Amino acid sequence: MTNLAGKIAWVTGAGSGIGEAAALSLAEAGATVVLTGRRREPLEDVARRISLGGAAHVQPADLTDAAQVQRVGEQIRTSLGRLDILVNNAGVNIVERHWAQLTPDRIDTLLQGNLAGALYCVTVALPFMREQKDGLIIHTASMAGRFIGGLSGPIYTIAKHGIVAMSHGLNMAECIHGIRSTVFLPGEVATPILDKRPTPVPPEVRARMVQPAECGDLIRYIAGLPSHVVMNEVHLSPTWNRGYVAALERGL
């Protein structure tokens, strides 16, 4: 089993979905986990569950605010002194996501929430990891970051493509410092972000999707790989892939 004892992991978007599952899984493997998200209450709930067998620190922040991200980094340095793993997971989507509905404010919400915030977190993590000559960053992107389609909306897709480019670029630039970057591209996952779909997703459909705990297990596996290797990119999708099924039904 993966042993992360002594490791410090910072998980963003840790109050629900993939971030929550990653935090619980990393803590189960022995890591001390720093939990960040906009709302304190869900983070404290995750921290309570972790505290039954591990250690967690709640650091709420709006990751679209660079100053708040820097403040979290300062708290990590002051209280913990190092950072071994960043799970760069926080993200958003909106119902009014398609071209005819987009406004500058909606574009800003999507770009800030899915790309700029992730970049801000990287600027905090890199100084720790360069000093240590070791570190791992795992970014939650999306299959929309590799394949262009209509479901997620154009700006979300653009932002997630940016996350993919960032991750590969980090490996190109930071490998000499012992830093590894993995971009995780899940297909449909049964998380609260589905509530932002223009068309509601019923429970029986969600049950066939990837589940958050399965993402958490994968993130823990990646975190346990030896430091001389990097998993550059990984996809995880439901066997009952709705895009494939729709194509088969159309006879394609």
Image: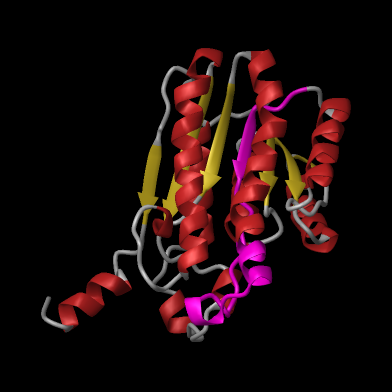
Q: Position of residue 125 (x, y in %)?
A: 68, 30
Foreground pick, 34 / 204: 34
Residue 134 image-quadrant placement: top right
User: How is the rendered protein coloured?
Assistant: secondary structure
Magenta-colored stretch includes residue 86: yes
Judged left or right of residue 80, residue 87 is: left
Q: Pick whichever, 86 or 2, lies toward us.
A: 86
Q: Residue furthest front?
A: 104
109 or 146: nearer the eye? 109
Q: Residue at x 41, y 80 (%)?
A: 205
Residue sitting nearer the eye, 178 or 164 = 164
> Residue 84 colored magenta?
yes
Residue 117 in picture, x, y percent from top left: 67, 49
- Magenta segment boundaries in residue numbering: 82-110
The answer, for residue 1, to whether it is visible in the render is no
Horizontal and vertical percent for residue 45? 79, 59
Could you tell me how many numbered marks the image carries? 0
Residue at 69% x, 14% y is 131
Q: Is residue 219 above or below residue 102?
A: above
Quick check: 238 above or below 247?
above
User: Taking the image as drawn, is residue 248 in sight?
Assistant: yes
Q: Relative to residue 126, is residue 163 drawn left or right?
A: left
Question: In the figure, 91 relative to 28: above or below?
Answer: below
Left or right: where 133 falls relative to 215: right
**Residue at 59% of width from left, 51% of height from top?**
115
Q: Quadrant of the C terminus?
A: bottom left
Q: Is residue 78 above or below residue 160?
A: above
Instruction: From the top left corner, tell me how far across and down residue 22 is, in percent.
Output: 59, 48
